[in-house]
Structures are given as structure tokens and as C-alpha cells.
Amino acid sequence: MVASDGGSPVIHGDRARLLPSPFPYQGSKRRLASRILRLFPRETPVLHEAFCGSAAVTLAAATSNPDLRVSLSDLDANIVNLWRAILENPDRLAAGYGALWEAQEKDPETFYYEVRGRFNIHRDEADFLFLLLRCVKSAVRYNKAGEFNQSPDLRRRGTAPSRVTKNLRWASQLLRGRSSIQQQEFENALTVAKPDDLIYMDPPYQGVSAKRDARYLVGLDPQVLVAGLEELTRRNLSFILSYDGKTGDIEHGERLPTDLGLTHLYLDAGTSSQATLLGRKERTVESLYLSPALIARLGELSPRELATPQPNLPLAQ
């Protein structure tokens, strides 16, 4: 189903079966990935996911297309090192997590802070995975020194090791041999992209980008993003950008400049959990921007038609 919202169509859809996730990550597009995949050209040899985080869109795309090769990048070295551990030796990572999960039993809160302190010195991948699975809202937070400083969620003790092992093995098997991961700024990571490839980006949003924010080691100046998008467009590259949106009538950030020539769609993200806590029922919609090169590859479809499942476009189920 598609509806109009402020002149830009909104992509709606049935809730797809959620794929496993190797680790939780606040802001992940896991629940929205199947609808983002509607905008993928059928012939896509390589997917580049910058600002990859937990790489939910990549995992969905790789599941739908067994021939797809993927290139992941993120500026957060902790995320990059975690992905390398997943790809290279998921069983060792799972064993490390399992040992930590068992060791927390007597005093989970004190143990969490011990692991956090050790991680900020040694940056061990199993420690980082444990923190992600035990911290509040699975949300990465850093202090000004770049140290992980998120608090533990005292209501739970993290995902059971058996399930974590299964999810890590699944992601590793899915991507091993056809993927790469690198720590780079998005402009540098995408220099290797070619016109037949597809780029997906989910950068820090404007509300947390203009200056340093605890959710990111380094913020992203919106002007830097716009300059990067101009360069990608000049190179005739196909890209999808998730960036800002709105909750109810409240806009989160300004829309990108129209002179970029991007097609703007909204993606229905469902009822806002924050609004629900405040006693309101408001829906969140996220902005999607499509490059001119991608629009050309998708054919003579109007923005409204792009927001509706098409028979010639792949759709994850």
C-alpha cells in the first residue's frame, strides 16, 4: 500500500519475517530492510553499505541474492573489528561471549562495569559483543575520550549463548567469501564503487550530526554529506540514502537540497515507541533518497510506483 505524505509517497508493507542479527544495534534497519530492497535493481553485482553498523540491509540483500558481493565500511573501529571477528572466526567469538555470559551470574551489574573498563583498554571483540547485548537499548555510547560508557540494562542478562552462536554462524556463512569490511570515511570507502553497483547509506542523522554526539565516535556534518552525495551523483552512481524523517507532524532535520536531484520517499517505520511512552499514538516515517542513476536503472516508474512492490524488482520475504 502507498499513501502520500507531504508530497512524498510513503512505502508501506506487510511485516516481513525478521532475519537473524549477529548483534543488536540501535537504529538498525532490520525491520525495514525488506521494503528498502524493493528499490534494488535486479542486476546488482556489488552492494556497498557505508555506515554499516549491524549491516541489516546487507544481510537481507545477501539472503535474497546468493550472487551478490558486498563491501561494508564504518568509521567506528569497534564495529569493524567485530565484523572481522564474525567473518573470520564466529565460533571463537561466540565462545568468548558465552564465557562472559556465564561469568556474570553472581553480580551482573558489577561484572558489566568490569568488562566495560577492560574493553576500553584492550578493545576485545568478545567484550564489545557482550556490552552490546547487555547495555541499555543495545545503544552504543561513547564519551569524549572515545570510551564506551553506556550503562547496563539491569532488567536482563543478554541473549543466551546458544542463540548468539547460531546468529554469528549464520551471518558468517552468509557473507564469508563474498564480503569485505573496512574502517573508512564514507567518501573514501565508496571510491571503488562502479555504475553497476548499488550503494546503501544510513549515516548519523542531522539531529546528532552537526556536532559530536555520544552515539558516534565522530559526527557527520550535513554539509560534508551533501558534498559526498554531489560527488556520487557526478560519478553516475546508484545509491539509496536513509536520512532523517518525521514523527507525527514533527520533522527531524531539514530535507536535503532539491538541487541534488534526488527522489524523495518516506518509509513507514510504524508507531513511535517514544510517543507511546508519552501517551501519544504517532507514526514515524523515515526519509529515503534515491539517486538519479538509480531512478534511471529502475525504469520509467513514478515516485508513487516506486513505493509500491513491482514485479521486476526483488523483494525479500
Image (cartoon, helix red, strand yellow):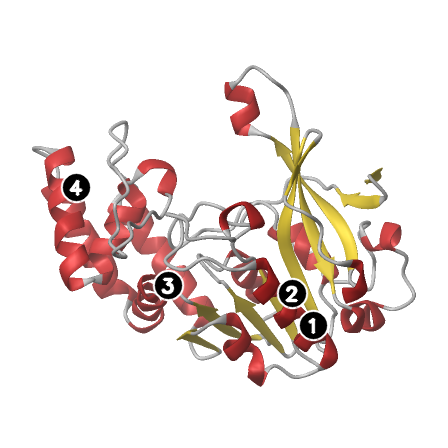
Q: Which mark is residue 76?
A: 3
Tell which tag, 3 or 2, sits nearer the viewer. Answer: 2
Gap between marks 1 and 2 measured at Cα: 6 Å
Answer with mark 4 or mark 3, whichever residue precedes in sequence: 3
Q: In the rendering, at what x and y percent does residue 133 appear? A: 30, 44
> Who is closer to the viewer here, 207 or 277?
207
Label 1, label 4: how many angstroms apart (C-alpha)? 44 Å
The residue where tag 1 is placed is 230
Eye-nearest disc, 1 or 4: 1
Look at discs 1 and 3 and give the one toward the viewer.
1
Q: Amino acid at mark 4?
A: Tyr
Element class at badge 2: helix
Q: Is residue 68 above or below residue 266?
A: below
Q: Earlier in the sequence, mark 1 or mark 3?
A: 3
Cα separation, mark 1 vs mark 3, equals: 24 Å
Label 3 crowd bin: few (<14), some (14–19), many (20+), radius 10 Å: some
Q: Residues within 10 Å of mark 2 (few under 14, many from 20)?
A: some
- The residue to which callout 4 is attached is 112
Q: Quick check: 69 left or right of 99?
A: right
Residue 2 image point, x, y percent: 82, 41
Q: Report the quarter where the N terminus lies.
A: top right
Question: Do tag 1 and tag 4 residues touch (Cβ < 8 Å)?
Answer: no
